[in-house]
Amino acid sequence: MTEGAGAAYHLRELAVARDPTSPAHRLPVIGAADRAILDIGCGAGQTLIAAELGPDRTAIGLDVDHDALALGRTLTSTVEFAAGRAEELPFAAERFDLVVSRVALPYADIPRAAAEMARVLRPGGRCWLLLHPPSFAWRALADSVTHGRIRNAVYQLYLLANGLALELLGRQFAYPLNRARFESVQTGRGMRRTLERAGFEGIAIDEGKFFVVVAVRRP
C-alpha cells in the first residue's frame, strides 16, 4: 500500500467510524469509568477520534505503521500516538481501564498479545476485540482457488491452521516464509481459552454480523 493509498484508507475508516448508519460501523462502548483507553492497531486513530472523548481522559493509539500514526497526529490533538506491537506493549502495568483492538489482533501472536493486554489493564479493566472468524479465510480460499491464485490459497490455509492451533494447542506459529509474520482467524472457543489463560474473566462473545469479544481482567 502506497503512502497516498494508506492515507485514503484510514480516512475512509474514519468516515465509517463516524457514521452509525454505515454497514461497517462498530465501535466499543466506552463508559464513564474508562478514564485511560488504549487502542491497539489504531491506524490513524479513527476509533478513538470517532469516540469524541473529552480532554479529561487519556486516549492512546498504538500501531506499527509510522505513516498512519503521523496522519493521526494531523487529525486530532486529543489522542496520543505511539509506535509498538501488541506482543510488547510499551506501557507500565495496570495503566489502562479499557483496551480496544479493531481487527488488529488477527495479525498478532494472540497468546502473547492477550498476556500483554492483561498486564497493562488495571484489575477489573476491560478489553474489547473485533476479530476475524474462520469464514474470513474460507471465502478468500475459495476465491483464490477459483482464480488460480495458488500462493494466496496456501496462505489462507495457514490462517485456518493457525486458528486451529490457537484453539487446540493454545499457541500460534509464524508464517514459514516470513518468521516475523503472524496471522490467523479466530474461533470463540479458542479466544475464550486464550483469554482465560491470560487472566481474564466475564468473557462475552458475539459471533453475529461482527465477531466481538469483551472480557474483564481478573482482580
Image: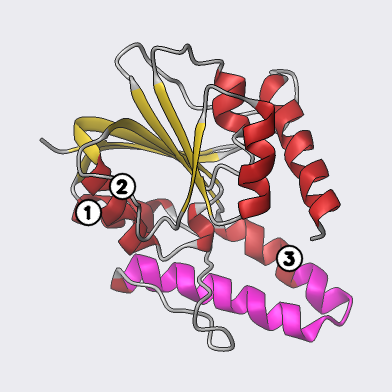
As drawn, the residue found furthest toward the left would be 219
Disc 3 target residue: 140
Q: Position of residue 98 (x, y in %)?
A: 34, 31
Viewer-nearest residue: 57 or 134: 57
Q: CA distance from mark 3 to mark 2?
A: 29 Å
Q: Looking at the picture, tell me which residue is in the foreground, 77 or 184.
A: 77
Say whether marks 1 and 2 touch (CB < 8 Å): yes
Q: Which residue is mark 2?
A: 117
Q: Which mark, residue 198? A: 1
Q: Quadrant of residue 42?
A: top right
Per the model, the C-alpha gap separating discs 1 and 2 is: 9 Å
Q: Quadrant of residue 147?
A: bottom right
Q: Secondary structure at mark 1?
A: helix
Looking at the rendered image, the disc whose residue lies closer to the viewer, 1 or 2, is 2
Q: What amino acid is labelled 2 in the image?
A: Met
Residue range in magenta is 142-168
Q: Is residue 191 magenta?
A: no
